[in-house]
Amino acid sequence: MSFLEDVLERAQRVADGAEVFAVSSAVTPVHFTANRLKAVQEQQTWGVGLRIIKGGRIGFASTTRQDDPQGLVARAQETLPLGPEASFTLPGPREYPAVPTYDPAVEALPVRALIDLGQEAIERLRGRWPEVLWECRLAKAVTTVTLLNSQGLSASATHSLVSLTLEGSQIRDGDMVFVAEAVVSCHPLRDVGEVVSSLDEQLRWAQRLVPAPQGEVPVVFTPRAMAGLVLTPLLTGLNGRTLVRKASPLEGKVGQPIVDPRFTLVDDPTIPYAPGARAFDAEGVPSQRTPLIEGGVLQGFLFDLQTAALAKARSTGSASRSPATLPSPSPSVVVIGEGDTSMAEAVGAVSRGLMVEGVLGAGQGNVLGGDFQANVLLGFRVEGGEVVGRVKDTMVSGNVYQVLQRLIAITRERRWVWGWLLSPTLVCGGVTVAAKG
């Protein structure tokens, strides 16, 4: 009998229902700093969480040890008096969609290949920008998730991942420029050309410092800006936990238009080999494509078992967790629908505005109400339909529901951001821009 089976069997003796969730991973990170290789490591981690239900309440405990199953069960029992009420029942065995997430070539990828990839990216960029200092992080990871429960459910899945992140800092006459780009894949990375081209473009645009436009102006939100700024309040409002707490401004608006009819937002963990893809969620519910906003109309929310029961809905297979936490609803692979405008045409439609690429301190303001506010870490002034230079000491703010009602353009081109978001560039009117000086 395995450790997980032993824990489940012991938990079933003392509880009305039990669930064991385990994650094991092997990660090899490679770190370059100041253009030089700094560290190479190999890390093995394992953890298990036990959720039990007894007398209508939830108990929970976790461990990273594999030698004390009874202790884990006892600790979960101890939390029952203070645990939340259980509004759900654990699922039984299910049929899962075929969602490929593992490439054995990642496991076989030598560390030398990661080092060479980082060195190649830095050398190509240094050839163009010798004064820029580069921080480069690469990693390969293979993770296995296993789930067992007292209803007979037994599920396991393995995921592979390779990531490359490059951050550059340029200091010139007291002025600092920060650029960044990243790529994440379920397959080995073979080419750094796209990352290098993006960073080269960012640096070229950043060399000229210009005043920021101020007031309510059109703003070009690149995919990175969408991930770091715009989507935070929007996904908060679409979260089932926010809904059942009566904190979502979207309560009671399913079936109603809430943003521009050109805007579509879907959560889809069934996309093959997307880094956030999965065949089942952290409670064993089958993954599905969940439309959230279609044609500007609110379609629904993201639920796990608990929030779905409280909302008198059904789980959307959106439970997410670590071994040390209870499940909660969370997006997996977010997809924003493409538009009908090229990037050049979208920028060309802006006579005077701002392009936001990176932000610092996002999430300020009334996030639950849809507000966003952040300092611009990397942004560019657009004048006469062209990028004319970089701005500094600039802040953008607005309300996501109002901004997405003032859409000017959505590009055909889309880009993956950290493997969890596929987004076009959006141009929105009426965003508030403020700057020092």
Image: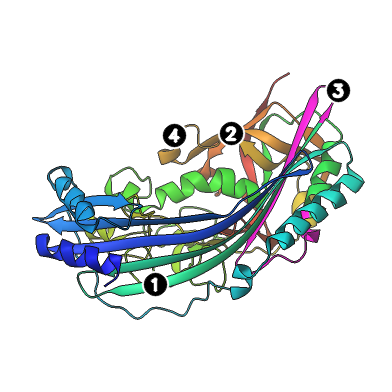
Q: Nearer the viewer, mark 4 or mark 1?
A: 1
Q: Is residue 50 left or right of residue 158?
A: left
The one nearer the camera, 278 or 149, is: 149
**Distance from the alpha carbon under mark 2 to that under mark 3:** 26 Å
Label 3 or label 4, whichever comes before in sequence order: 3
Kindly identify which numbered label has been placed on residue 374: 2
Pointer 3 residue: 173
Residue at 75 percent of width and 61 percent of height: 342
Q: Is residue 213 left or right of residue 149?
A: right
**Distance from the alpha carbon under mark 3 to that under mark 4:** 37 Å
Q: Amino acid at mark 1?
A: Ser
Badge 2: few (under 14), some or many (20 or more) residues near its Cα, within 10 Å?
A: many
Pointer 1 residue: 156
**Distance from the alpha carbon under mark 4 to that under mark 1:** 39 Å
Pointer 4 residue: 366
Q: Residues at badges 1 and 2 in contact (C-beta under 8 Å)? A: no
Q: Residues at badges 2 and 3 in contact (C-beta under 8 Å)? A: no
**Distance from the alpha carbon under mark 1 to that under mark 2:** 40 Å
Q: Is residue 249 left or right of residue 339?
A: left
Residue at 63 percent of width and 46 percent of height: 225
Residue at 73 percent of width and 60 percent of height: 112
Q: Position of residue 377 (x, y in %)?
A: 68, 35
Q: Position of residue 7 (x, y in %)?
A: 23, 63
The residue range painted magenta reads 171-195
Does the magenta run of residues contain 176? yes
Label 1 or label 2, whichever comes before in sequence order: 1
Q: In the structure shown, which secondary structural element does the residue marked by tag 3 occupy?
A: loop
Q: Amino acid at mark 4?
A: Asn
Residue at 15 percent of width and 46 percent of height: 78
Badge 4: few (under 14), some or many (20 or more) residues near its Cα, within 10 Å?
A: few
